[in-house]
Image (cartoon, helix red, strand yellow):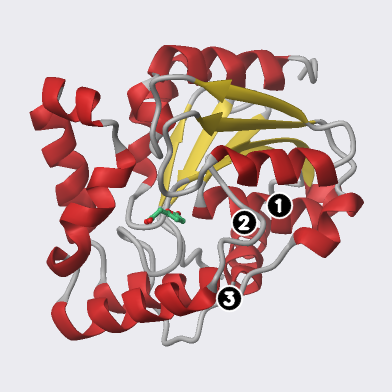
Amino acid sequence: MTSRLHLRVDGPPTAPVLLLGGSLGTTGAMWEPQVAALAEGFRVIRYDHLGHGRSATPAGPYTVDLLGREVLRTLDHLGVPWVHYAGLSLGGMVGMWLAVHAPDRVRRLALLCTSARLGPPEPWRQRAATVRAAGLPAIADAVVARWFTPTFAAAHPELVAGYRAMLTATSPAGYAACCEAIAALDLRPDLGRIGVPTLVVAGADDPAIPVGHAREIVDLVPGARLVVLDAAAHLANVERPGPVGRLLREHFEQAGG
Ligand SMILES: O=C(O)CC1=CCC(=O)O1
């Protein structure tokens, strides 16, 4: 069996595995600001979602259930029995799904800039239709405007251009299928079953997934802790690399290996 998910692997081979899942329209490269620090203590494995980056793009429809099962297949393929998991946005949705449906495979969870239900579904179906008809460039300006605060974007135009290029390089079919997976998602009834220590991080200035979504997750996941980062929009790990790196290290290092 081979993995259909493209992986980037850093850190000591015998260290505990920290699996990182990214946002819609990105690849594992979006975690670059944190990888060096995290790889000091963890075997950091970054994956591209199905339909993204260098992962396979099987025919749809996609659901978050399908994306999560593909992650489990990949862990089986690698012979990894359990992981710590951090996910941003779509990556966080997959993380919640894993912690609910494969509780023995996730030891600790970090959920960044994410939502248990990012409704209503119609705008997601409309975005999928636009991307299928006109490609990623048709939505790229609007999406990237939600990824970074205007202040950060003005100060870092080359970095922002790099992330925009990551988005427009995404398979239109894969991106659209993931939009439809988000449209259909509602994990709220399941979150009470999450039994692992959970850190929830939100960007105070995230127009894509406002802080209320993080508060809802914290209300529903037993014992979850909320941190709201100021001066951060949707890709908070890019805009606030140091604080996000420290939060993740502190959270996962508490596991004691
Ligand atoms: O693309 C957006 O608008 C923001 C987003 C929602 C889910 C995700 O992964 O990114």
Q: Residue at x 77, y 15 (%)?
A: 254
Kindly identify the amino acid type of the residue bearing the numbered disc 2: Val
Q: Is mark 1 within 8 Å of ligand 1?
A: no
Establish if 68 lies above or below 158.
below
Q: Determine the CA span between mark 1 and mark 3.
A: 13 Å
Establish if 15 lies above or below 89.
above
Residue at numbered disc 3? 63
x, y percentage for residue 105? 78, 48
Direction from residue 69 to residue 135 in the image, left or right: left
Q: Pointer 2 and pointer 1: residues touching (CB < 8 Å)? A: yes
**Residue 54, label in figure:** none
**Residue 94, label in figure:** 2
Q: Is mark 2 within 8 Å of ligand 1?
A: no
Query: Is tag 1's residue or tag 3's residue first in the polypeptide sequence?
Result: 3
User: How many C-alpha atoms fall within 10 Å of the one at disc 2: few (<14), some, or many (≥20)?
Assistant: many
Residue 171's image quarter? bottom left
Front residue of 211/54: it is 211
The secondary structure type at the circle numbered 1 is: helix
Residue 176's image quarter? bottom left
Kindly identify the amino acid type of the residue bearing the numbered disc 1: Met
Query: Is tag 2's residue or tag 3's residue first in the polypeptide sequence?
Result: 3
Task: Check the picture and name the quadrant holding the C terminus.
Answer: top right
Q: Is residue 121 visible?
A: yes
Q: Residue at x 42, y 30 (%)?
A: 236
**Residue 96, label in figure:** 1
Q: Quadrant of ligand 1?
A: bottom left
User: How many C-alpha atoms fall within 10 Å of the one at disc 1: few (<14), some, or many (≥20)?
Assistant: many
The secondary structure type at the circle numbered 3 is: loop
Kindly identify the amino acid type of the residue bearing the numbered disc 3: Thr
Q: Residue at x 55, y 32 (%)?
A: 202
Q: Determine the CA span between mark 2 and mark 1.
A: 5 Å
